[in-house]
Image: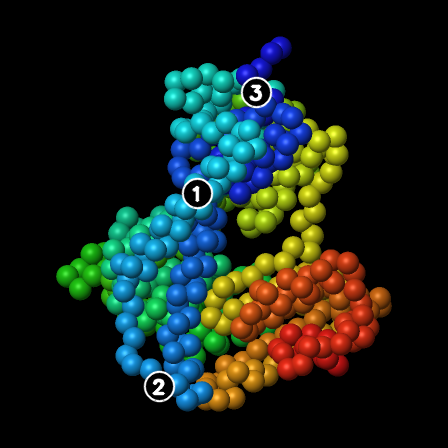
Amino acid sequence: MTFDYDLFVIGAGSGGLAASKRAASYGAKVAIAEYDLVGGTCVIRGCIPKKLMVYGSHFPALFQDAAGYGWQLDNFLLDWEHFITSIDQEVRRLSQVHISLLEKAGVELIAGHAKFLDPHTIEINDRKITADKILIAVGGRPAKPDLPGIEYSITSNEIFHLTAQPKHIAIIGAGYIGTEFACIMRGLGSEVTQINRNHLILKGFDEDIRTAIQEGMSNHGINMIQNTEVTAIAQVPEGLKLNLSGDDQEPIIADVCLVATGRDPNVEGLGLQNAGVDVVPGSVEAGYCTTCAIAVDEYSQTNQPNIFAVGDVTDRLNLTPVAIGEGRAFADSEFGNNRRKFSHETVPTAVFSNPEAATVGWTETQAREKLGDAVTIYRTSFRPMYHSLTGKQERIMMKLVVDTNTNRVLGAHMVGENAAEIIQGVAIAVKMGATKQDFDDTVGIHPSAAEEFVTMR
């Protein structure tokens, strides 16, 4: 059978872009469909605009720190409209860059919603397109709990487009998104209340990371309400009223309510049933729901031999570099005569909170679950030299998780300024199987915070 394309990609986000360009470089005829700005969550409403907001939120603290070093500064104010507009302009610039890269690679971009008609046929803009192989890379979308008045809340999609800075923002959720935006908005000068149904933020991270960030956030003036859920949201003359579980919890009044209770695979409207693509059943817990993810094997192949899926829509490890890695591994395997798997082991990640955190490898809990008592922990906590003149009581925490039997470093964790930059380098050593002795034998750069990773005893 003759097809219109060798590969048709649904979704021009990180995974889809990486896969389409790599496949085209092998000579495949490739098209990619996207109904929104090219770039996906990362470029449009995720990593990039969020990190720009993180940068912006750091300036007030830097101005304050400068006084400790003798600088005299006048009053400073944030021009919110300029701030948000500048971020949007950069997002749109990057989207155009990705379009140019697709053109350069010879990938055809088709604007519109794509839907399966059968395993080899896609419908888009009333046009039927056939392809030998099809890759689903549509990412995810913010999830909202089923609560009365939830329609008055916003998600991470809308927070980048607020026309005015909230005086008080309430945040429901304490994962990556909720924690990062709590710190961003507090840094920008808003009053922030974060509601967490658990005792600690960032479930799944190392306990020392969770504790250190939570303590730092509290010290920075974020009101953290723990072991509590929002039961209803209502509009009142003062703004939004959030009712909380527990008889002793007073309602919260805020200008804006951000819901950050997770993300769902974006499978609706794809017509997966028409192609016979299997999904993994979702679950519902206390109003927090997860829709179905596309089921794939270790080569990102679905139950249909010609249909594949990468990135957040598979709900494996939802990180931009992972989606890119999965997309390239797919293209290498199917078009580059280099069949290979993308490893989801020892993937470093960061939380751009304040204080910042980064991690790679096993947590202490994971290590003890797998190795029992054969685990040695090296941990340090100290005040960075930078703050010796600012007067602030900021702390840095570093931690190594080591296999006692082999002396291999299984995990490295850090909370503090530049944690992401430092752990990126440490991740190479952990990925290569470095031992604690290898760390000890490495000469530190002095004076630096990073040297602590090679001086812990």
Q: Which residue is mark 3?
A: 5
Q: Which residue is mark 2?
A: 72
Q: Is residue 289 visible?
A: no
Residue at (36, 66) in percent of width and height: 185
Q: Is residue 12 above or below residue 410?
A: above
Q: Position of residue 214 (x, y in %)?
A: 48, 72
Q: Residues within 10 Å of mark 3 (few under 14, many from 20)?
A: some
Q: Position of residue 62 (x, y in %)?
A: 42, 77
Q: Disc 1 or disc 3, which is closer to the eye?
A: 1
Numbered tag placed on residue 187 in the rendering: none
Q: Disc 3 or disc 2, which is closer to the eye?
A: 2
Kind of residue indicated by mark 3: Tyr
Measure how far apart labels 2 and 1 are at the Cα level. 40 Å
Q: Nearer the viewer, residue 152 or 309?
A: 309
The reply to whether dot 3 and dot 2 touch (C-beta < 8 Å) is no
Q: Residues within 10 Å of mark 1 (few under 14, many from 20)?
A: some
Q: Is residue 435 above or below residue 133?
A: below
Q: Disc 2 or disc 1, which is closer to the eye?
A: 2
Measure how far apart labels 1 and 3 are at the Cα level. 24 Å
Label 3 SS: strand
Residue at (48, 37) in percent of width and height: 100
Q: Position of residue 294 (x, y in %)?
A: 56, 35
Residue at (64, 39) in percent of width and height: 328
**For residue 302, what is the image quadrant?**
top right
Residue furthest left as drawn = 237
Measure how far apart labels 3 and 2 are at the Cα level. 63 Å
Upstream in the sequence, badge 3 or badge 2? Answer: 3
Kind of residue indicated by mark 1: Ser
Label 2 SS: loop
Task: Look at the image and tell me in which quarter the C terminus lies.
Answer: bottom right
Query: Left of 132 or right of it: where is 154?
Result: left
